[in-house]
Image (spheres, helix red, strand yellow):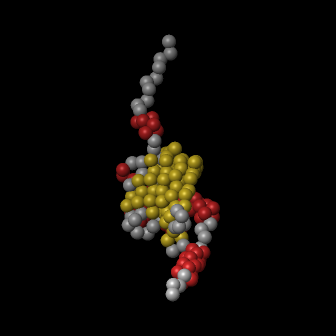
């Protein structure tokens, strides 16, 4: 005698089990998480310096060797949390450094399907002074990656760069003054 109901019952049970597992996965509120990441990266990467709130800033960076960022100059490349702490203490907490303001344009934040990785891109103007003289980044491209670790977003990678056109303008010698005839 051939049983035809058993394979169908097994298939139905398996489908019910798999659909039940999928529905137990918490849904990611993409809009809320994207807004949260956007707020954290703006504050942790730049705006913290206005009030010199290092505790809040450090809370939003990976506290291990995975932290990495490129700056427009090679001397600013940073590897690991210890290097970041040293940079903050030696440069940004130095009384000679004063954060003035920052503006962000064309910011785009994307979230992974699983909701535990985010990446962003945008343009930043970061205005500061060093010993009273301007020390600014204007029209700097900014990309990065954040991970959600133990429920909190932490920055693990950033890249700041200037366009080739901007670098050419900065490196071009000034044109000689023209004489009036």
Q: Single out the residue that lies furthest toward the bottom.
A: 1
The answer to whether residue 60 shows anywhere in this view is no
Q: Single out the residue that lies furthest toward the top.
A: 181
Q: Nearer the viewer, residue 110 or 9?
A: 9
Q: Is residue 177 above or below residue 125?
A: above
x, y percent for residue 155: 48, 63
Residue located 51% across and 84% down the image: 2
The image quadrant that residue 31 belongs to is bottom right
Residue located 59% across and 68% down the image: 28
Q: Is residue 40 above or below residue 171?
A: below
How many labels were placed on the picture?
0
Q: Is residue 97 above or below residue 60?
A: above
Left or right: 71 in relation to 152: left
Residue located 55% across and 58% down the image: 110
The answer to whether residue 18 shows anywhere in this view is yes
Q: Nearer the viewer, residue 19 or 10?
A: 10
Q: Nearer the viewer, residue 1 or 156?
A: 1
x, y percent for residue 157: 44, 59
x, y percent for residue 30: 60, 63
Residue located 54% across and 70% down the image: 152
x, y percent for residue 150: 51, 74
């Amino acid at each position: 005698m051939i049983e035809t109901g058993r394979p169908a019952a097994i298939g139905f049970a398996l489908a019910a089990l798999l659909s039940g597992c999928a529905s137990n996965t918490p849904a990611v509120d993409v809009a809320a998480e994207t807004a949260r990441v956007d707020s954290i990266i703006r504050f942790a990467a730049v705006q913290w310096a206005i009030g010199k709130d290092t505790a809040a800033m450090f809370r939003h960076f990976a506290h291990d060797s995975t932290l990495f960022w490129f700056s427009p100059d090679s001397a600013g490349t940073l590897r690991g949390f210890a290097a970041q702490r040293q940079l903050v203490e030696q440069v940004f907490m130095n009384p000679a450094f004063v954060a003035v303001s920052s503006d962000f344009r064309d910011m785009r934040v994307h979230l992974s399907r699983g909701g535990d990785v985010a990446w962003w891109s945008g343009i930043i103007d970061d205005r500061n002074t060093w010993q009273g003289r301007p020390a600014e980044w204007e029209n700097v491209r900014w990309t990065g990656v954040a991970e959600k670790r133990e429920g909190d977003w932490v920055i693990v990678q950033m890249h700041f760069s200037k366009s080739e056109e901007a670098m050419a303008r900065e490196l071009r010698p000034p044109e000689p003054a023209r004489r009036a005839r």
